[in-house]
Amino acid sequence: MKKQIRIYHTNDIHSHFDNYHAIVEYIKPRKDENTLYVDIGDHVDRSHPYTEATIGRGNVERLNDALCDVATIGNNEGITLTKSELKNLYNEADFEVICANLRDEHGLLFPPYTIKRIGDIRIGFIAATVEFTPFYKALALDVEGAFYYIKEYLKEMKRHCDAVVMLSHLGKYDDERLAEECPEIDVIIGGHTHHTLPENYKVNKTTLTAAGRFGEYFGCVDLEFTDYNLTDVSTRLIETDLLSNRYDEFYDVGKEMLNTTVKHDVLAIERTLYTMNWFTYTLLQMIQKYTQTDISIIHAGLIAAEFRGGEMTKYHVHKVLPHAINLIKVEMTGRDLKDMYYTASAQEYKDEIIKGLGFRGDVMGVFLIDGLSVVESRREFYVNGELVEDENIYEVGTLDMYSFGRFFPHFNSLNKTYYIPEFLRDIVDIYKDDLIISKEF
């Protein structure tokens, strides 16, 4: 007896509904009793107004419409929502959500695996998400131990499955390590690192695949069975640009849902990548208030779009600050503080196009600091009028995207407090009375 089962897969859609619409229009008419569709997480991205307005529930509706069978969560589902919002995100899902390494004090938030029957063939799906431990801890969640839990649940699964498929939002290098350490896994469908792989790519006997990002591609895995034994696996990617029906009907829906006034007569916000303006200065002040610090640092490219002035709605704030970025408080010595200043002053990244890290803009722009005064001629630093001492401890309010070590490597070893799940735009809403108004309006 021979049987072929096809699995369509997406990952890291990030609310690119234009591409996703085309993918859905391709998959739906091809779904039959021998076909499954799975999503590997980061379908949600609150940079899109529809996702923001529905707190991700609109994305679940789109997955339902696509006839999704199984999904796992990415970091955008896991840490850009409150714990309650995450627990309730999939209440209306017509598909199963699995994740082996996400827990709270009561245990798993989702089942670790599921087994799908296609005729007499049993395909086991197990999933895990990336271990962004400090962020999850700030939400009273635990995500550590992905490899341990995967190996434990594989012991249960292998007795009941004819094939095992891993839905991995761990990233390319962990996927390759999984293939090395877990020969029980037949196929790893990956995500998180926005990578693609050649067709039929293998590590040992495990086949790995992934479909990039933003729905620019989606994937197809064909499993061939002979007498219940998996005898062949083939993979391919389909380029979404080659499909028709690419449009985003949900942008205007989300825009209308966010049409709530934040403040009237607000001064225009310019996008100045290489200088400070009134809004970036105000944002620095807001960050100090929220984190209860005397010093703050951001980069000018945070302003993703201009605001022409007048009535500011939640949609306008979202457009100006679409980022999935939270605040952190970093404790550092005076010596660390000086290192931060000199690193920022070098402005090595000011012209770079930045991708990932929660940043949803394009050009980085210059670093902007408030609360720290410097007399360059004497190399003296002052906070609140007092000379900075090398061994004293100071607190800096800033962005969680700096905690990954790319811009300020020494931040990795410093004590940090994470403020989750509030985004920058939420801070603006909290301190909206600080926004400058113009008598021109």
Image (cartoon, rainbow, N blue to C red):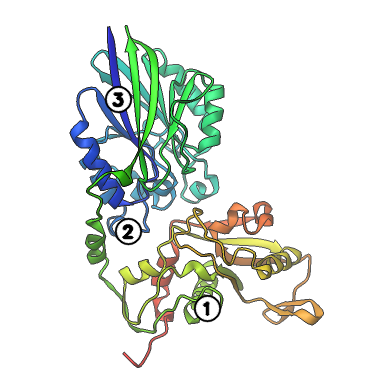
Q: Where is mark 1, residue-wise?
A: 281
Tell which of 403 and 427 is nearer to you: 403
Tell how many labels: 3
Picture residue at 33% right of the left edge, 52% below the top: 16
Q: Which residue is mark 3?
A: 6
Q: Is residue 138 left or right of residue 1?
A: right
Mark 2, secondary structure of its residue = helix
The mark nearer the N terminus, 3 or 1, is: 3
Residue 94 showing in the rendered view = no
Residue 61 image offset from top left, x and y in percent = 23, 46
Q: What is the spatial separation of the Cα atoms under label 3 and label 1, in whole angstroms?
A: 54 Å
Q: Position of residue 145 (x, y in %)?
A: 54, 33
The three-letter code of the residue at mark 2 reads Glu
CA gap, disc 2 and disc 3:
33 Å
Query: Three-letter amino acid code at disc 3?
Result: Arg
Q: Earlier in the sequence, mark 2 or mark 1?
A: 2
The image position of residue 62, as x and y in percent, is 24, 45
Depth order, front residue of 8/167: 8
Q: Report helix, strand or loop for mark 3.
A: strand
Residue 169 appears anywhere in the view: yes
> Which label is found at residue 52?
2
Q: Is residue 167 above or below residue 51?
A: above
The disc labelled 1 sits on which kind of residue?
Tyr
